[in-house]
Amino acid sequence: MIAVKDRKLALWNIGIAYIAFIIGTFCGLLQVFVRNDSLQLPKFLDYYQILTAHGVLLALIFTAFFIFAFLIAGMSKTLGSFGPKVSLFAWIGLWTTAIGTTMATVMIISGKASVLYTFYAPLKASGWYYLGLALFIIGTWFTSFALLGHFVAWKKKNKGQFSPLFAYMTTATLLLWIIACLGVVATVVFQYLPWAFGLTDTINVELSRSLFWYFGHPLVYFWLLPAYMAWYVVMPKIIGTKVFSDSLARFSFILFILFSFPVGFHHQLTEPGIDSFWKFLQVVLTFMVIIPTLMTAFSMFATFEISGRNKGGTGLFGWLRKLPWKDVRFSSLFIAMLFFIPGGAGGIINASFQLNELVHNTLWVVGHFHITVGTPVAMTFMSVTFWLIPYLTGREFPKHLQKLAHIQIGTWAIGMLLMSTAQHLLGLLGAPRRTAYAGYNGNESAAEWFQGILSNHVTMAIGGTILFFSAMLLVYIVANLMFVAPKVQDENDLVEFPIAESDTSHTAKFLENWGIWVGIAVALIVMAYALPLYDMIQNAPPGSRGFITW
Ligand code: HAS
């Protein structure tokens, strides 16, 4: 059992995450109906306003608060409870992040920041929106440094020992986050804030986008790595085995630190202001990310097979039947992994120079991120929710809630399958993203896109509705686990915090040498970004004034 004060900190983070989840998913529901042309929003609400709220609250706020809750709880569990300084920094982090979130959300709701979660210039939001975002990032840095400080203190006390795998992965994830945020902080502080508060008249659009995507791509791995932590460290314990290979797991996280950053241009392949050489270089580096992903896939299959065979499974696939399918903590993880197969493959398509021409700015990309962050990551967080909240609150996870949890993950999977398949197909046919209902003034060929069995807005709306139902079911389960389910009487009956055993006897010492890895990451960043960014600043076109199109 971790210390009460650490539990409280983690629970506050989870609570805020789920408040963002409720508003964000409701906006998602409204969106699919607007796109379907079957809902007229009231005058005070605009499609782009709810699209911004949906993106910011789910992709940035829900994920970040949930991730920090998981990391806080896991660091306290594996390295021992936090000292007063760590706690203080983590609380300051929580409140700064919460204040930033509130400022940004108020700006979106009051219609002053309908700029979507990517906040591309020259769309211009209120300066308070950017200030809210800046506070949000600063807050996460406080928490990150608190956890890193806890890690360093543990290392000092345990000289020469390998850190527990969970703590090692947390450190890798936080380093990735801190280095990634440098880009978005630079653009917000030096470009957006002076521009939005009227200190400068124009903004260098290409530079702002490039700095955003320098952050935007590692951001997706900031979501993914905590999910991988649950796959590598939590899942083996749930299915009754050990971590397949400690060094493989550590090395795959290191590869993510190296190859997450020098790749942001793959989001900008259609932009004219970047020389194709730099795009080509970053596309090649993007493909390097396949390596740690496939290492993970291999490791997961090996873990499943070892566990299944230990339980008596025979034959080529007999071990599959021995896996604990009735345990919702496992089944949601497994479905999450299944979705990652088409999700990741879609990423490879997006990153391919020529294929990107076909899919960029279409609904395909929306389909892609719903089966990456929206399913593998989100369903892994659901699996974690089912044991982490009762562990922290000291409550049971009663049978009836477990049944509901099965329905919840099943409906999430079905809803996502329908919605994202429709989005992928519609995108391939040409339907644009980032738009409200687009009928192209009744143009015949545009109308044909929407006439397929799966490629139509109705399928998307049905998928979206099922998803909303599932989201509300999840909120019901979360509320019960937080406040209603019976408290366990005996500490031995407490829901388990599953951390699998990991054998470090073959792990190379240099994997713990963070200096080397951060150094190589910085070298790769300089190689991929220094000259193109210099060029964008040195040969900048006249900047753009701001546009408020809503
Ligand atoms: Fe992506 C756009 C490329 C992965 C999220 N991506 C987005 C956006 C988001 C997002 C949110 O190159 C939209 C941004 C916006 O608003 O504009 N993506 C990639 C690539 C990968 C990738 C190369 N994306 C992710 C992940 C995300 C995510 C993960 C969230 C968590 N993405 C792009 C590109 C764009 C893009 C372009 C811009 C498109 C445009 O033009 O706008 C790679 O990381 C993928 C590597 C993965 C694989 C996996 C194949 C899977 C296999 C099995 C794995 C199985 C496992 C478990 C681990 C190669 C082979 C197995 C166990 C079982 C039992 C099944």
Image (cartoon, rainbow, N blue to C red):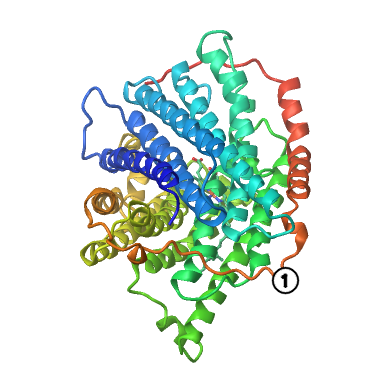
Residue picked out by circle 1: 506
Left or right: residue 490 versus residue 315 is left
Q: Which quadrant would residue 487 be assigned to in this image?
A: bottom left
For residue 115, above or below residue 69? above
Task: Pinpoint residue 65: horizontal percent, then vertical percent.
Answer: 44, 41
Residue sitting nearer the eye, 347 or 527: 527
Residue 362 visible in the snapshot: no
Task: Pinpoint residue 504: horizontal percent, then vertical percent.
Answer: 67, 68
For residue 272, above or below residue 367? above
Left or right: residue 252 versus residue 306 is right
Residue sitting nearer the eye, 308 or 259: 308
Could you classify mark 1 by the number of other residues whose Cα lies within 10 Å: few (under 14), some (14-19), or many (20 or more)?
Answer: few
Left or right: residue 310 versus residue 184 is left
Q: Which quadrant would residue 287 be assigned to in this image?
A: bottom right
Secondary structure beneath label 1: loop
Residue sitting nearer the eye, 117 or 359: 117
For residue 215, above or below residue 358? above
Residue 492 visible in the snapshot: yes
* Quadrant of the rendering where the C terminus is positioned: top left
* Quadrant of the rendering where the N terminus is positioned: bottom left
Task: Pinpoint residue 330: horizontal percent, then vertical percent.
Answer: 40, 68
The three-letter amino acid code for the residue at tag 1 is His
Residue sitting nearer the eye, 493 or 292: 493
Q: Residue at x 70, y 45 (%)?
A: 282
Task: Pinpoint residue 461: horizontal percent, then vertical percent.
Answer: 27, 49
Q: Residue at x 42, y 41 (%)?
A: 9
For residue 4, above or below residue 138? below
